[in-house]
Image (spheres, rainbow, N blue to C red):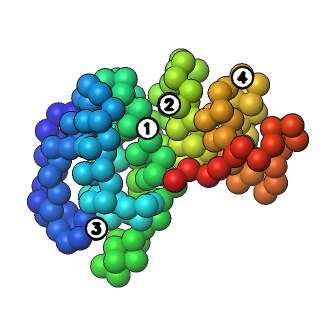
Amino acid sequence: MSNDGTDWASLRVRDGVGMDPGPIRDMLLAPDPRSGDEAYWRIEGTAFYSHELFEATEPLTQILVDAVCDGDGTPLGLMFATDMLVEITCGYTSPHEEEVGNAGLADRCRAIVRHRLPCLYRLVEDTTDDIVLSHLIWIVGQVEDDTTARRAFLEKVSHREPGKPSRNALHWCLVEEYGQDHQKESQGPEHSKPH
């Protein structure tokens, strides 16, 4: 994560204005789950919270998707980054942001990620980490705006033998896509939506 010139001190966040960008780097370079988790929660709750996006989410989104696509972080840090991108791409613009004329924030964040779709599709093919794969399924499912391409992607992923996290992500993406469960009946009630 290079210095991108963002004036983090002036950006609106959940509880006012200003954000320390240090935890972003700490999360991406996390050497262990504890430090990664601590950094993650210093970002969520500030730039966004429980899918509610604030002004600081936009530059954060760019940093995260670039880090994921460029491999700029530890494997654990990139897993946290993809998790955060799920939260953002499934998110909505905060009512406060809408009040100040920033109504298109969530769409702009998704557009930032959409711009890197070729890379994300490659990562889906290359990843062997099922948790990261589940995150990528959610992300692509949220940002791919070409219905034919999105459905082809979901169909292709459904032919893999993913683990439980990816099966869960695929299940809910299919439910969102088709309005019903297209999974095998034998998979049972193991599916839960992302936090």
Amino acid type, residue under disc 1 in the picture? Thr
Asked whether the residues under the numbered discs 2 and 4 touch, taking CB atoms below 8 Å apart as contact, a structural biologist would say: no
Amino acid type, residue under disc 2 in the picture? Val
Q: Identify the residue at horizontal 40%, vertical 77% (top origin).
A: 95
Dot 2 surroundings within 10 Å: few (below 14), some, or many (20 or more)?
many
Circle 4 sits in a helix, a strand or a loop, which is it?
loop
Q: CA distance from mark 1 to mark 3?
A: 21 Å
Q: Which sits earlier in the primary sequence, circle 2 or circle 4?
A: 2
Residue furthest to the right in view is: 185
The residue indicated by pointer 2 is 132
Dot 4 surroundings within 10 Å: few (below 14), some, or many (20 or more)?
few
Asked whether the residues under the numbered discs 2 and 3 touch, taking CB atoms below 8 Å apart as contact, a structural biologist would say: no
Amino acid type, residue under disc 3 in the picture? Arg
Q: Identify the residue at horizontal 61%, vertical 44% (top origin).
A: 141
The residue indicated by pointer 1 is 82
Q: Which sits earlier in the primary sequence, circle 2 or circle 3?
A: 3
